[in-house]
Image (cartoon, grey):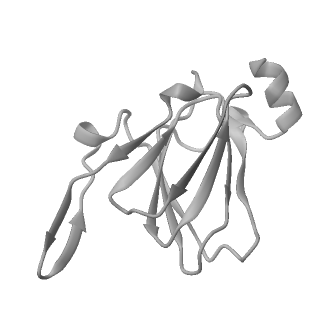
């Protein structure tokens, strides 16, 4: 799928004197069945995460706390997102390379995935990935 299918999704955000509440209903807000959820935290200063693309898997990334940058490419177009709002998620479609970096202290990245973990779904070598998409 082309990079143009990657987008930000806004989730319902309720605010009152007690604070904020954001909810995500898979069937109403996520364009796939959620089969796996995980989160990244305590990423040391200067470290990167990601560094791969998926062949089939789709993901939503949410900055639950703090902020981080997501750098994406489909081999033709490069896009950067600064995630820092827990009421929006970044949809990443298949065959899009992602690098996550510049994590703020105490940042938490929540990931919802369309598939369970499968090492065979990964492109981990950037040059091989570029050869596949170009």
Q: Residue furthest left?
A: 17
> Observer-nearest residue: 84 or 36?
84
Q: Is residue 92 above or below residue 14?
A: above
Q: Is residue 25 left or right of residue 47?
A: left
Residue 118, quarter of picture: top right
> Observer-nearest residue: 37 or 63?
63
Q: How many marks?
A: 0
The N terminus, quarter of image:
top right
Q: Give the x, y percent position of residue 124.
A: 79, 41
Q: Give the x, y percent position of residue 123.
A: 76, 35
Q: Residue at x 21, y 53 (%)?
A: 12
Residue 56, quarter of picture: top right
Q: Residue furthest top?
A: 134
Q: Residue at x 58, y 28 (%)?
A: 3
Q: Is residue 127 left or right of residue 69?
A: right
Q: Is residue 75 above or below residue 80?
A: above
Q: Is residue 74 above or below residue 111?
A: above
Q: Give the x, y percent position of residue 126.
A: 83, 37
Q: Is residue 90 left or right of residue 44?
A: left
Q: Give the x, y percent position of residue 35.
A: 44, 43
Q: Residue at x 37, y 53 (%)?
A: 88
The C terminus, quarter of image:
top right
Q: Is residue 24 above or below residue 15?
A: above
> Observer-nearest residue: 71 or 48?
71
């Amino acid at each position: 799928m082309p990079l143009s299918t990657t987008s930000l999704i806004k989730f319902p955000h309720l605010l009152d004197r007690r604070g904020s509440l954001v909810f995500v209903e898979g069937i109403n807000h996520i364009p796939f069945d959620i089969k796996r959820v995980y989160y990244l935290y305590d990423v040391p200063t200067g470290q990167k995460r990601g560094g791969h693309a998926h062949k089939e898997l789709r993901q939503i990334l949410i900055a639950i706390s703090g902020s981080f940058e997501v750098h994406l490419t489909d081999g033709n177009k490069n896009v950067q997102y600064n995630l820092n709002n827990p009421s929006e998620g970044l949809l990443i479609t298949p065959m899009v390379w992602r690098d996550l970096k510049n994590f703020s202290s105490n940042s938490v990245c929540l990931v919802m995935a369309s598939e369970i973990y499968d090492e065979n779904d990964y492109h981990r070598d950037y040059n091989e990935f570029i050869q596949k998409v170009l």
